[in-house]
Each structure stands twice: as structure tokens, then as C-alpha cells.
Amino acid sequence: MRARLGIIITLAAVVLLLIILNAASYVKVERTAESEESPDRSTYNSGPTGTRALYDFLRESGQQVARWTDPTSSLLSVNGPKPATMVVVGRTIVGYGDADAKQLLHWVEGGGRLVVIDRTPDQRLLPKSKNWTIRTHVLRYPFNETDPTNLEQMTAEIKTATAAQPTRLSRGVQTVLPSRFSGAIDLERERKVTTTGKHGGDSTFDEDTDSTEDEAPEHYKRSGSQAPAASENDFSSAPVVDIVGADGVLLVDYPHGRGRIVLLSDPFIVANNGIGRADNLILALNVVAGTGGLIAFDEFHQGRGSTHNALIHYFAGTPVLALCGQFALIALAVIWSRGRRFARPLPLPQVDRRSSLEFVASMAELEQLAKAHDLALENIYHRVRRAMVRYAGLNNLSPRAEVAARVSGRSGLNRHELELLMQRCEDAINGANISGKQALHLARRLREIEALLGLRTRTRDERQSAES
């Protein structure tokens, strides 16, 4: 354990040093201020350009609302509750590919409802409705100095918009306050013209939008004027204009298959910095809620898809991930070093499985069987006598009478009894007849004298044998 204590202390010191270095070198990256030029339209964002307020209001008002973090393909194969409305707000961080747009529109054709809220939406999400084409254009673009929290900068010289006609989306809306950077929706309609040839045959073709005024198809840009009457054949496919502003149409909706597509050309109306202005909240609820059902906000294309590890995303930008990597490297280094030999090979330690008591028991059994009581007594007496000689300050050749006298004078033991004990032990060793009981009595008496004098010959012998 002492050998490993140094390794443990070294590892702890290295880890502490790494923590100090990471803490000293870590520089907190300040979050860039939001702007209309690079907005974050996610429902997780509570900043001015986010849509957190709308999402929380829908949830608190009892609407079924969810953040959709799965790929677009899951709309066609989801096993749980299926969304009735998919909301795409603003310019997404992850753009829609051709496959994504095709799958999303296929979901709309099956009866889904797509809400697109953007100034310049992806044209792949706005398919033609028979002979109607829907596009947007922007008159004023935001600049870096525009503060999204400043209402005066966002709505300078902008008049409120009103409902073009009573529809489900404009219900309860009197005035809507868009931003100065809102887009205007263009509705282009192509008419089929029938002409009679020289030989009396009829031919039908679609007129080009660059034809003369008398022959040109109707090219209608909504700017507040009355929409032309649609023919009976294309009435059901014509876009419905709901909200019209000073710069053009703000809100339209039109069918696509069995579903419907809604286009709102200004995210300011549903963003945190604009939803509380005029009747923007009422319009946002009408546009997003629709006819009920689960409302899903597309967070996958906002860069918050479920394919990303939530734990790693939470600790992104902090030194925690670097610390975990360093800990893993340290663990690998320890495992690698423990599994490699860094010095010459050493023989395995030979551990004697036998104990000292096993030897003593064997010798005692042999002496008892051979009735060699004198041999057992000799082993004990010689060790005690050597200890007594050292205790008395004499040498091993000193007679027992002198040894007994010196020991008695120093310890207070009876000299006569001590000398008699030594004589009887020497007589037994020299061949005098002695029984096992007598030998045991003499051995017990020698141990008592050893204990009284504090000689502890067995402990000293064990220590000397261990040292040698």
C-alpha cells in the first residue's frame, strides 16, 4: 500500500494541475448579440428574435404543441401522435434539401398543414397551385446596426396592416404591426389562351408573362387592390389573401393536395420582440393553431435535432469535455503502464506454505514417541541458561552456582531453588532417568523464571532468525 500511495498522490497532483490549467486557460466566449441579419427563430430562444413566447403561450393555453427534433422523413413514419400542423419559422440553420422538401410536401398532400413564416422562404416549400405561383420579395433589408429590441428601429415609418377579407386566419384581427423588413407576397397567375389557326384548327397554350398587355396573362401582385375574379375551374386552387399591408400582401394560404400551406412573410409578427404589438398575437394564434391538433415547431432544421447528443450539446463550449478527455487519457496511460514491464524480470517470490508451529508440532510428536524428554528439555534449558548468563553479566563457562548467585542477587529469586532447578535440568540432559511429567514440570518452571526475569528468549530468537 505504501508503494501505491506515491502513485495515487502523483495522479491526484496531475489531475489537480490539469484542472488548474483548464480553469486558467478557459476563456468564456461571449454570446453574440442577436440581430435581424442573423436571427435565431428557435422556440428555445428567449431573445428578441426567438419564438419562445409564442410556444409557451400555446402550451399554457392548452394547445397541443411540441418541438419537432426528428428528420422530415419521420413525418411519414411516426408511430406516436402525428402533427396536424408543421411550423417553419425564419431562415433555418440546417437548410431543406430536395429530399426533405419532397417528403414535407408529400405529408401536406396527405392532409397536413404547413405554416411557413419567413421574408424569403425556400421556394421548394412553396409549390405551385395549378396555375398559381407564390413568391416573395423584400423591399428593405436589415443591417448590422438594427437593434431587434428597439421597436422604433424595427417599425419606423410602417403603417399597420389590416385584413383583406374575413377568413379563418384573419378572425378577430383588426390591425397587425409588421416590421419595416417584412416581405411582400407576389401571386402570379397564368391563363390558358385559345387561338384559331388559318385552317380553322384551335390551339391552346400558356401565355408568357412578357407578352403584350392585351395578350398577356394576368400577373397580379397584391398591393391592396381588389383581386381579380377566378374562373370556376381554378377557384379551389387560388391562394386566399388574408392580410394586406402598405407594401403588399403579408399572409396567404392555399391548398396542396388534401392539405394546406400558409405563408406569412414577416417573422417579426410571431417573434418575441413583435408578438405583443397590435393584434400580432391573435394573428399568430390563428396562423399556427389552425383547426386544432398537434402543432409541431421544426427544431430539427434550427440545429437542435435529436441526432445530436444532448449531454455533449449541454457542455459544449466549457472545459468539461476537455477534462473528460484528459481523464480518459490518464486512465489509458495507467492501464498501459500497469500492463508493461519497465525493468528486468524478477523471480516470483517463494512463499513457504509451512508454518513454524507445524515444525514444532512435528518435533514434539517425534520426541514424545521416542520418549526423548531429555532432548526437549535440553533445547529449552540451553536457551534459558544463555539468557541468565547475559542477565548476570557472566560468560557461558561460569559455574551454575555463580550464575544462580548473581541472578538471585540481582532479581531477588531464591538462590537455592534456582541452583537446584539448574542442577536437575543438567542431570536430565546428562542421562538421568526422568519421566515426561517431570520434564514438563521443569520446562514450565524454566518458562516462569524466564518470564519473571523478563528475558523473552523466544521473542529475541525469532527476531534474530528473521534478521538473519
Image (cartoon, rainbow, N blue to C red):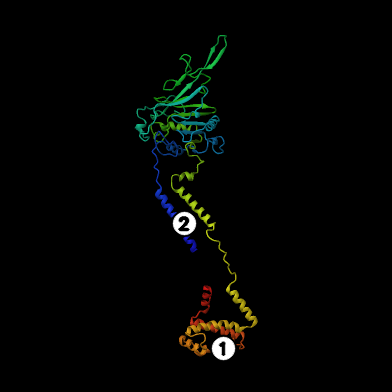
Question: As displayed, is residue 52 above or below residue 176?
Answer: below
Task: Label 2, secondary structure: give it.
Answer: helix
Q: Which mark is residue 424?
A: 1
Asked if residue 179 is positioned above or below residue 436 in the image, the reply reads above
Horizontal and vertical percent for residue 168?
A: 47, 28
Checking the image for residue 270, the label placed there is none
In the displayed orientation, state which residue is furthest to the right: 369
Residue position for label 2: 11
Q: What x and y, as percent, mark residue 385?
A: 52, 84
Residue at 58% in and 74% down: 357
Q: Is residue 441 above or below residue 343?
A: below
Percent position (x, y) of residue 9? 45, 59
Mark 2 vs mark 1: which is more N-terminal? 2
Question: Does dot 1 land on a helix, a strand or a loop?
Answer: helix
Give the vertical position of 346 relative to 411 (above or below): above
41 vs 450, nearest the viewer: 450
User: Which residue is at the front of the view, 398 or 391?
Assistant: 398
Q: CA distance from mark 2 to mark 1?
A: 67 Å
Quick check: 171 left or right of 258?
A: left
- Density class for disc 2 (Cα within 10 Å; few <14, some 14-19, many ≥20) is some
Q: Nearer the viewer, residue 183 or 245?
A: 183
Mark 1 belongs to which amino acid? Answer: Arg
Q: Which residue is most to the front?
A: 344
On screen, residue 363 versus residue 227, left or right, reads right
